[in-house]
Each structure stands twice: as C-alpha cells, then as structure tokens.
Image (cartoon, helix red, strand yellow):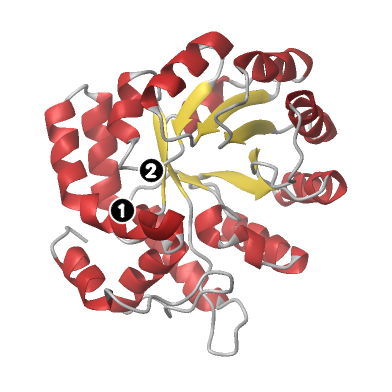
Amino acid sequence: MDTSPLKTALADVVAIPVTPFAADGNIDTTAHRALLRRLLDGGVRVLTPNGNTGEFYALTPEERRTVTELTIDEADGRATILVGVGHDIPTAVAAARHARDAGAAMVMVHQPVHPYISQDGWTDYHRAIAEAVPELGVVTYIRNPLLAADRLTALADSCPNVIGVKYAVPDAARFGAFARDAGLERFVWIAGLAELYAPSYFATGATGFTSGLVNVAPAVSLGMLEALRAGDYAAAMKVWEQIRRFEELRADRQFADNVTVVKEALASLGLCRRDVRAPSRVLPEARAEVADQVAGWSI
C-alpha cells in the first residue's frame, strides 16, 4: 500500500462538517448536501464525516452510515474522505469496513471514551481496527496527555496503514516532544484543536489542522493554512486574532458549545437550523455576538 498520496492529502485543513437537523429532528440531507458543496466549492479538500463537530456521539449507527454515504456521494472525488469511527471494537470495525466499501480512503479512530484505558489497551484497540481495514489509511485521535509515544510507534510497527495523528492535547510543548518521540517524519501530524492552536502546533511539527469553523468561512481557514505553509506566522496570527473570540466561545465551559456556536453561526447566515442534540444544547445566550463575529469575516 502506497500511503504517500494519503499523507499528502492530510497535510491540509481537515474539515469536520456539521450534521444539520430538520424540524422533525432527523438529518436534513438537503441542507447537509448544500453545506458540503459549499465547503468543496470553497476549496476544502479533506472532509471528515462523523467527527465531533458532526455530533458523532449523538448519531445512531444508521445515521452515521447515512452521513458517510452522503458525504462520499456529494464529494464525488473532489475531496479525500476521512470517516470518523469509534465506540466498541465491533462497532468501529463495522463502520470502518462500511467506509471502505462506500469509497472512503481513510478512517479516523475517535479517542476511546471507556473509563478504564490502559496504554497497551489503547494500542490493542487501534490495532484491531487498523488490521480490519488494511486498505485504508488510519488516523489516530489523541486527546490523552498521558499516552506514551512508544505506544503509537508500536501500533504503527504492526499496522503500517496507521499514517496520521490528530493530536488534541492543549499543550504545544508536549505535542512537539510526543511527535519527535513517536517519529516526526513517520506520521502526518494534525493540530486537532483547530485554528486557535494551529500556529503553535505548526511551529513544532504539525502540517495540517482540523476545523469546525471552516463550515462557516472556508476562506478564513484556508487563509491561515496558506500563511502557515509559507512560514508567515505574522499573517497566520492576523487570522488567529480575527477568529479568536469565536473559538473562545466554542471552548467555553469545557467545550460545551463547540458544535452549538458553529451551528448558530450557520443559522445566522441562513444555511441550516441551529438545532443540536443532547447532551449539547442550543446556545442560550451570545447569539448576537456569534452573528456579529461572523459578519466581520470574509464569507
């Protein structure tokens, strides 16, 4: 398996599309397709259906399959598809195989939410999924600051299709050390905490970053990527200053409004309903502030 094209694709803005809901609570497939087309037309080239901004944990298995198929169909080869999978091993394996059969190129394995995770158990969990789909590239999603770099190395030694890391620990120094201990050139390192952390993570080795904000303003996210690729940190920080408050609103109360703020922004633009599913909740305040933030961007 030649993984170089997949590694090249990952070094980009990795968009996490929202999952819009209709008034009856079901997925609004018409709005979903329109939002995906907007991302594609805006220049986005990596889409992650069933990511956290897509409310992965609030979707049923059937809905997650629908989101996967809809995204692959709408992209129609215009973007690389990185499907989020997770939960128990059989569920994750079934989702990964479905993604493969539907035409996806890669899967992203969500950080396990089991309350009792050993480091070797983390490796075993990911190995079981990666071995089930050797044809696909696999990206690990690391949110655990205690995970040792040698566990990732051991995983990749046994599963060469593990090619990327979405690193979402809010510590740039730890990221820099972890990436070098695991193999800076061996994996594609993706700043998993979006635009607010992208400049500091790029400075220590990342070559891509995830984004939920990109749903609202693709040009803003791609503008930051262009600046970071050029090593123009002054320009990147101008974008950072522009979107700082928006991302702080998403991070408020331990990221309780991560999805809510994005959907509120999209609703202010008339692009989808603001509805989210529990345990998220529609933004109770700051609606006007979100709309004001977006109004000042290049949409």
Secondary element under disc 2, as helix, strand or loop, is loop
Q: Is residue 254 left or right of residue 118?
A: left
**Residue found 48% across the figure and 58% down from its top:** 17
Q: Is residue 276 above or below residue 157?
A: below
**Residue found 13% across the figure and 34% down from its top:** 235
Secondary element under disc 1, as helix, strand or loop, is helix
Residue 132 percent coordinates (x, y): 84, 34
Q: Is residue 162 left or right of residue 169?
A: right
- Which residue position is annotated with label 1? 247
Task: Kindly report the distance in space between the C-alpha atoms of the residues bearing marks 2 and 1.
Answer: 9 Å
- Which residue position is annotated with label 2? 194
Residues 140 and 7: in front is 140
Residue 261 percent coordinates (x, y): 36, 66
**Residue found 67% across the figure and 67% down from its top:** 59
The quadrant holding residue 206 is top left
Q: Is residue 137 visible?
A: yes
Residues 44 and 282: in front is 282
Q: What's the amino acid at mark 1?
A: Glu
Residue 89 percent coordinates (x, y): 83, 44
Q: What's the amino acid at mark 2?
A: Ala
View extreme (right): residue: 90
**Circles 2, 1 touching at the beta carbon (< 8 Å):** yes
The quadrant holding residue 129 is top right
